[in-house]
Image (cartoon, rainbow, N blue to C red):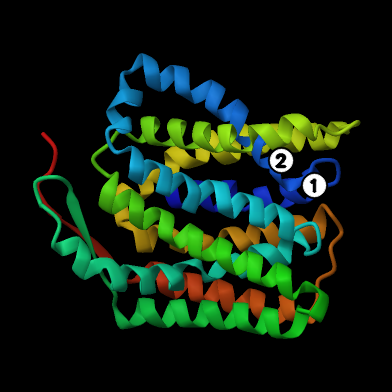
């Protein structure tokens, strides 16, 4: 249920971002997306005593905020000023493979950390699941090879950095923050991001914001940030950081359908060839593999 909900919820932001950047600069959009979410979540987390609880791990909390939210959301919004929402979404489908690579690199380091301080997440990757990751990534390669033009190369690099951030965030979460309350982590993370972008946003306010842009920002803040992150934290706890990122194989399909049907974006040859490969990779990748939690659980 968590996987299905996130697949839909995180398939919507690409459409909303594409609409929002019509009137807002990328930095202002990130602030407008995180500030309302922070105002809603921080008082609730504070009332439950979860803000102080997460601040004891403030260095890793800052790292998570930058890697998962602050940098990717700015770069994705900047890229969508030039790329279509559907194209951007399918490029982000490389996140699971990046997650597999990063998980392998940091697994040995994670096993050397004091077991009493946290739970270790070990991902067991079967051949079927690895094949799914490969098939899905080949779809992204086909998409980029056919649809990317010289003027969009910078945007392609920006989305690539977004994929690395989206893959690295769950690893920080599972290895350094998994024993902390999810509401506290997400509320402080969005608040830190809002504070970071506030100076720029408050001095670069647009002269006019259309109703469509306003509704898009509201959807990004409430549904795609506050609600989605709480669901994502629960999903990482259930299936581990690498398998959780496989959700990015489904939400690009949602984004593609929305981009073509709602925004009238062209259904190109690259999308036509890459889209079924991404879907096939999703079926394979989510059908195999398991996450095994080791170490001492909180009691």
Whether residues under marks 2 and 1 lie with C-beta atoms below 8 angstroms apart, the answer is yes
Q: Which mark is residue 21?
A: 1
Q: Residue at x 46, y 44 (%)?
A: 65
Q: Residue at x 34, y 43 (%)?
A: 59
Q: Which mark is residue 55?
A: none
Residue at the disc numbered 2 = 29
Give the vertical position of 226 relative to 137 (above or below).
Answer: above
Residue 90 seen: no
* Residue 54, image quadrant: top left
Task: Determine the CA span between mark 2 and mark 1.
Answer: 7 Å
Viewer-nearest residue: 170 or 277:
170
User: Neighbour class for label 1 at 10 Å: few (<14), some, many (≥20)?
Assistant: many
| Residue 99 screen position, x and y as percent | 40, 67
Horizontal placement of 38 versus 170: left or right? right
Q: Earlier in the sequence, mark 2 or mark 1?
A: 1
Does dot 2 land on a helix, a strand or a loop?
helix
Horizontal placement of 67 versus 100: left or right? right
Viewer-nearest residue: 257 or 191:
191
Horizontal placement of 32 versus 6: left or right? right
């Amino acid at each position: 249920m968590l996987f299905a909900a996130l697949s839909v919820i995180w398939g919507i932001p690409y459409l909303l971002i594409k609409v929002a950047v019509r009137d807002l600069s990328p930095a202002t959009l990130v602030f407008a997306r995180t500030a309302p979410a922070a105002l809603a979540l921080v008082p609730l987390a504070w009332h439950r005593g979860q803000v102080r609880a997460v601040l004891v791990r403030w260095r890793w909390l800052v790292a998570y905020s930058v890697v998962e939210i602050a940098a990717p959301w700015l770069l994705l919004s900047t890229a969508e000023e030039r790329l279509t929402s559907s194209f951007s979404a399918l490029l982000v489908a490389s996140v699971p493979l990046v997650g597999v690579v990063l998980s392998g690199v940091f697994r040995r380091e994670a096993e050397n950390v004091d077991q009493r301080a946290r739970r270790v997440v070990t991902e067991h990757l079967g051949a079927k699941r690895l094949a799914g990751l490969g098939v899905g990534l080949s779809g992204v390669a086909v998409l980029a090879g056919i649809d990317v033009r010289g003027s969009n190369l910078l945007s392609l690099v920006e989305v690539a950095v977004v994929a690395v951030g989206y893959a690295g965030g769950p690893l920080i979460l599972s290895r350094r923050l998994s024993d902390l309350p999810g509401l506290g982590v997400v509320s402080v993370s969005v608040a830190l991001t809002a504070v970071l972008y506030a100076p720029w946003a408050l001095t670069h306010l647009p002269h006019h914001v259309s109703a469509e842009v306003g509704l898009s920002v509201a959807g990004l803040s409430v549904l795609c940030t506050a609600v989605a992150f709480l669901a994502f934290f629960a999903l990482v706890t259930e299936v581990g950081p690498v398998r959780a990122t496989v959700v990015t194989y489904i939400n690009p399909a949602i984004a593609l359908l929305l981009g073509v049907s709602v925004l009238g974006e062209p259904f190109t040859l690259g999308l036509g060839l890459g889209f079924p490969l991404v879907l096939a990779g999703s079926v394979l990748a989510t059908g195999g593999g398991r996450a095994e939690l080791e170490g001492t659980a909180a009691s």
